[in-house]
Image: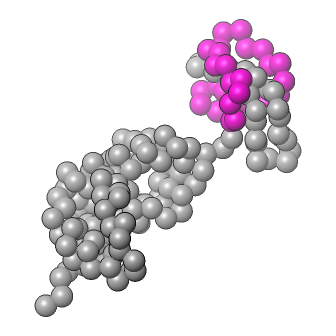
């Protein structure tokens, strides 16, 4: 059984039954929180010093396009959703390949985890075929993030 004890942390539980603590501990067994409170003991647990840290539940991002991760910063001058659709869907997305979607989903998910988001709804509207779809889901699973996968297709260019 794996045990982890976070000591002396500032805890925001988001649960009125548990409450918040300025200087307390969290005992985790097999990836589940089993106790929260001051001065917990767990002799065989790995101990992490939480002093000066805030511990709280992960954030939820209810709308993200992780496939676009490597394009962040591009389009800073697009001023409307019309600009976004004209440039993203009718130009850039048409050149995306399966490996690009995989990298975007993996890196985008890891970035979310790095910044405290543990759950996402990933609107992946770049998908052209089953392989691209499976690869996008594989990347989310590999990252370890909790995700709802919302599938969409690339919009064909207007004629």
Q: Is residue 63 left or right of residue 133?
A: right
Q: Is residue 41 magenta?
A: yes
Vertical comparison of 118 with 78: above or below: above
Relative image position of residue 98 (x, y in whole percent): 19, 56
Vertical comparison of 41 with 35: above or below: above
Q: Quadrant of residue 58?
A: top right
Relative image position of residue 74 (x, y in whole percent): 31, 62
Relative image position of residue 61 (x, y in whole percent): 54, 58
Residue 115 visible here: yes
**Residue at 78% over, 14% down:** 41
Q: Between 156 and 132, which is closer to the camera in this rendering?
A: 156
Q: Quadrant of residue 94?
A: bottom left
Image quadrant in which the C terminus is located: bottom left
**Residue at 56% over, 44% down:** 116
**Residue at 36% over, 41% down:** 142
Image quadrant in which the N terminus is located: top right
Please give the range of residues in magenta.
Answer: 28-55
Count every numbered label the image shows and give the total: 0
Residue 134 visible here: no
Q: Is residue 115 left or right of residue 48?
A: left
| Residue at the bottom extreme, as displayed | 159
**Residue at 26% over, 56% down:** 101
Vertical comparison of 5 with 94: above or below: above
């Amino acid at each position: 059984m794996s045990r982890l004890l976070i000591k002396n942390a500032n805890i925001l539980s988001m649960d009125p039954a548990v409450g918040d603590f300025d200087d307390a501990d969290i005992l985790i067994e097999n990836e589940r929180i089993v106790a929260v409170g001051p001065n917990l003991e767990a002799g065989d647990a790995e101990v992490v010093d939480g002093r000066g840290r805030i511990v709280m539940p992960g954030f939820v991002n209810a709308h993200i396009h992780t496939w676009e991760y490597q394009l962040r910063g591009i389009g800073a001058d697009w001023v409307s959703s019309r600009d976004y659709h004209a440039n993203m869907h009718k130009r850039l997305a048409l050149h995306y390949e399966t490996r690009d979607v995989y990298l975007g989903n993996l890196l985008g998910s890891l970035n979310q985890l790095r910044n405290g988001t543990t759950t996402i709804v990933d609107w992946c509207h770049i998908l052209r075929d089953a392989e691209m779809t499976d690869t996008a889901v594989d990347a989310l699973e590999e990252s370890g993030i909790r995700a709802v996968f919302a599938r969409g297709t690339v919009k064909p260019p207007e004629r």
